[in-house]
Image (cartoon, rainbow, N blue to C red):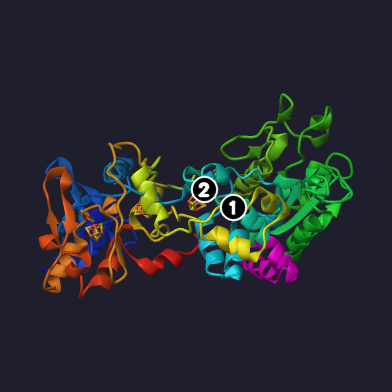
Amino acid sequence: MSAFTIAIDGKQVKVSPGQTVLQAARHIGLDIPTLCHLEKCGPLTTCQVCLVKLAANGQSRLVPSCATQVVPGMVIESETEEVHEARRTALELLFSDHVGDCLSPCNRLCPLQLNIPAMIRQIEAGRLDEAITTMRQALPLAGVLGRLCHHPCEQGCRRGDFDEPAAIREMERFLAEHDFKQDSRQSRACLSERPASGKQSVVVVGAGPAGLAAAHDLARHGHAVTVIDRNAKPGGRLRDVPEGELPAAVLEEELALLAGMGIIFKTGIELGNQVSLNGLRLGFDAILVTVGELAEGDGGKLGLPLAGATLKADPSTCRVEPPNVFAAGACVKPVRQLVRAMAEGRAAAECVHQYLLGQTPRRPGKPFSSIMGRLEPGELREFLRAASQEDSVSPCARCSGINRDEALREAARCLHCDCRSSGNCVLQHYAQVYGADANRFRAERRPFEQQLQRHGVIFEPGKCILCGICVKLTEMAADPLSLTFIGRGFDVRVAAPFDRPIEEGLRRVAEDCVRHCPTGALVFADEIKVVAAH
Ligand code: SF4
Ligand code: SF4
Ligand code: SF4
Ligand code: FES
């Protein structure tokens, strides 16, 4: 039979006999999720996330696209809400007994989403420049946060269930000070990396924590940013912090880093006095108002709509009327903590960025993470196995700042609670894309288990989705002891036969299996240290 056409989402697609619907859909650029599909293994059809809707003879049904061959006149639906819902449900079912945290508890609790375990691994390995980059990617004004943040991350630190939480904030302060001593070489280098094209101009009104964080993010997106402030110097309420808690030199250094990114500061200019909203609208593509708490009479002066004592901004888009004006921080809702004010600035910057790209602004949601919850004592011991048993630095060292040795010792106490596949995991990726709720079908979970094999392979059965890829690959390679599924019903698991360690079952194709495992169930141990910031 020669080539023919099928319809996918109303589009005529030319296909060849023997092709699958998945191949045809990918050919026209559709991103159908697959977890158990690996071309050379043939269809395994264990995950059911690649579903499409097939209409035939007046009836329609959901079928796995990876295992459905094209036939002339076929009518397929792929990108519809109904099909997406079916794929989302398939993903959620895979999490019903999943044992893992994609993101560590500390990372999830950081309002700025710093990848703390990645930064700590870099400190522990003495790769301080990399740790500075990881920190600077997530934290605007890192040197200020390293001193003043109320560190909600440490409240959720799993090491705290055993003794003291890791001194995360002090490690940040150490990194900022270490770089400060080398003329902020690494901070300047990593902050200068940003896309050069698509430059649009934004004015941020108000140089307090929310405004500075937003300016930082907008500049990183490649926009031309000007910050105006009514005071003589930028910094807002950071200027009121006593010298003992935040030395002026630290704030100046952080502001110099922002200026080094190309951000232009203009002080002594007040919106409603020296400059009007209409004036700014003529000069800039977008305006972000972060003027802090409004004093009586401020509202009218700004020329923006009010809701009570604050500006009326749409919480899901950070937008106020007119359409290219956005607002964030205490002028929209009271925010007490510094890091939360910065996170508000970041959310608004993201909306402004989307607007400048011509997209509909939408406040970013939380990143997806499977959550393991509280550990049983035996499970905590598994996590403690590879960590230093030393006590944390003294409270005295915590408040005066820690040195390099103390930072390295503190880093060695971290339990690395994140999944070493996070950022590379296909299951996590599609769960995020499809907005899956990992808890929707959550049943009582299995205990956390980590099998460390002699030749460097780690197997975490709780993260195995029984896709069958490793079983098939070992079978195809005719390994003397291929992997197999053992057990029945809910107790099925991947194992080597005769109770042998799993790596004996994947000798010849270990690398292939680890590479193609769609989750963090199979990884190489040395990847613990190299999982990059994401
Ligand atoms: S295997 Fe994937 S989904 Fe599971 S915890 Fe790790 S990153 Fe998250
Ligand atoms: S032990 Fe390390 S990874 Fe785990 S929560 Fe604490 S700092 Fe984060
Ligand atoms: S361990 Fe094997 S069966 Fe389990 S998810 Fe990974 S590749 Fe699939
Ligand atoms: S059933 Fe098609 S990819 Fe898993």
Q: Nearer the viewer, residue 471 or 431?
A: 471
Q: Residue at x 60, y 45 (%)?
A: 347
Residue 477 sits in quarter: bottom left
Q: Nearer the viewer, residue 300 or 266?
A: 266
Few, some or many C-alpha atoms within 10 Å of disc 2 (few <14, some 14-19, many ≥20)? many
| Image x and y of residue 157, in percent | 51, 46
Q: Residue 209: say if magenta.
A: no
The answer to whether 455 is drawn above or below residue 368 in the figure is below
Q: Which structural element holds mark 1?
A: helix
Query: Does any atom of ligand 2 lie closer than 8 Å to the CB of label 2?
Result: yes
What are the residue bounds of the magenta stretch? Answer: 175-199
Q: Which residue lies under the disc numbered 2?
A: 106
Query: Does any atom of ligand 2 lie closer than 8 Å to the CB of label 1?
Result: yes
Is residue 221 among the parts visible in the rendering?
no
The amino acid sitting under disc 2 is Cys
Q: Residue 198: say if magenta.
A: yes
* In-image side of 506 versus 133 (left or right): left
Q: Which residue lies under the disc numbered 1?
A: 168
